[in-house]
Amino acid sequence: MAVQTLEVHPLDGPHPQFGAEIDNVDLDNLSDADFETIRNTLYNYHVIVLKNQAGVSPKAQYEITKRFDPACEGNYGHGKTLDAKRSVLHPDLKTIPHQPQVQVIGNGHYDEYEGLKDITLKHPHHKSFHKSVISEEDDLDFTRFYRWHIDAALYALNPPKVTSLMAVKVPAGRRQTLRYDDGTGEEMDVPLGTTAFVSGQNMYDILSEEDKEFVRGAKVEYAAHPYIWMSPAKSRTDGLGMISDGLELPLSELPPVDESQIKILPMCWKNPVTGKLALQIHPSAIKAIHKPNGDVITDLKEARDLVHRLQRPAISPKYVYAHDWVEGDFVLFNNQGVTHSVVGAFSPEERRLFRQCNMASSEGVMGADGILY
Ligand SMILES: [Fe+2]
């Protein structure tokens, strides 16, 4: 076999050490040394783009994603909760029958794809999730961050270490203006259907010293069955958490809750390679904040406002990496070190097909104290 050296090129991203492209990757014949290069790059750059991977099978996608966490059991990151019709995630993903850790997402109708027959994919649109929406006449020119998140069930299962996203079909490239619509006037020019990433490390680094000390010791309690719990509620215009109108489902309307499975996770997660801290909070799923002094903020609005104040500076345009997808792009991202969002408003004839894979981690996330939670 010819020896090919992997070439790592940092991307011209929003700030140094965020995003890298790796060329010459053969995912079907990846030596341990090559994988180590990819893993190191992932934990140093957080989002890595492998070009020209159109031939990668769902099985190979599963295998490379699992290689970051060989001890994991190979269960999809959300387990089987996607099946719950009330989950806000339910409409967005379809499971590949022969590789259930791999989900298909996109827009448009497909007669057949990897054993899925006669499927209609619908790109998530902010109008189904945000409280106020962009007007119908502006809808194809303007867009928003749909929902900033970490890929994680946040109940019973550990957050996946790595997510892979593969672009199988990408519609021809028009652009849109992304509006924050939060009174700041901020907006950014983005490729249609971009995936937006921000660095959790940067989110932490730009905090005041006082806030850094707070987030190093604070924890977030997530709602049980969070994606069902939040389903009647609506999001802020910037996609960074929910509006507190008291619409969340009461316990009596959720599936049975096992108290021992509720996740209380640190706000800061430690990078396993660099040791650096990332501020990692899924803003839509928070239920309460456990302060470093042991006090608990249970008032939802107060907890959400605090998290929004901590996270919002880091989603400003200058810190966002908005990937411009090309067919065959295979992106791996450090799901425990970035927060990301779906973006874009498609017309029905703009067809898009992506594959996503992640798995519930074999272990908890590491807090600033080095303990696994
Ligand atoms: Fe995601």
Image: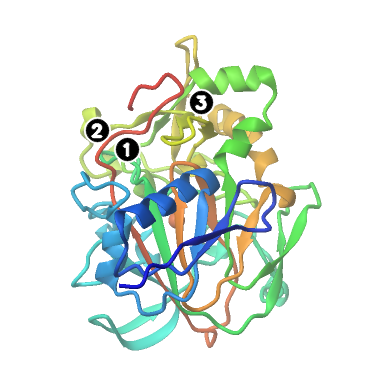
Residue 261's mark?
Answer: 2
Name which quarter of the figure residue 82 lies in: bottom left
Answer yes or no: is residue 85 visible: no
Q: Residue furthest right?
A: 185
Q: Is residue 372 left or right of residue 233?
A: left
- Residue at image coords 71%, 54%: 180
Q: Nearer the viewer, residue 9 or 290?
A: 9
User: Please, what secondary structure does the residue beneath circle 1 have?
Assistant: loop
Q: Quadrant of the C terminus?
A: top left
- Asked if 127 appears above or below 182 in the picture, the reply is below
Residue type pointed to by label 1: Ala
Q: Residues within 10 Å of mark 1 (few under 14, many from 20)?
A: many
Q: Nearer the viewer, residue 344 or 50?
A: 50
- Per the model, the C-alpha gap separating discs 3 and 2 is 22 Å
Q: Is residue 34 left or right of residue 241?
A: left
* Residue 124 in the image, given as x and y percentages of width and height: 49, 66
Q: Which residue is mark 1?
A: 224
Q: Is residue 192 left or right of residue 83?
A: right
Q: Nearer the viewer, residue 138 or 37?
A: 37
* In this view, the mark in front (3 or 1): 1
Cβ at disc 3 under 8 Å from ligand 1: no
* Residue 6 in the image, given as x and y percentages of width and height: 46, 62
Residue 299's mark?
Answer: 3
- Residue at image coords 23%, 48%: 70
Residue type pointed to by label 2: Gln
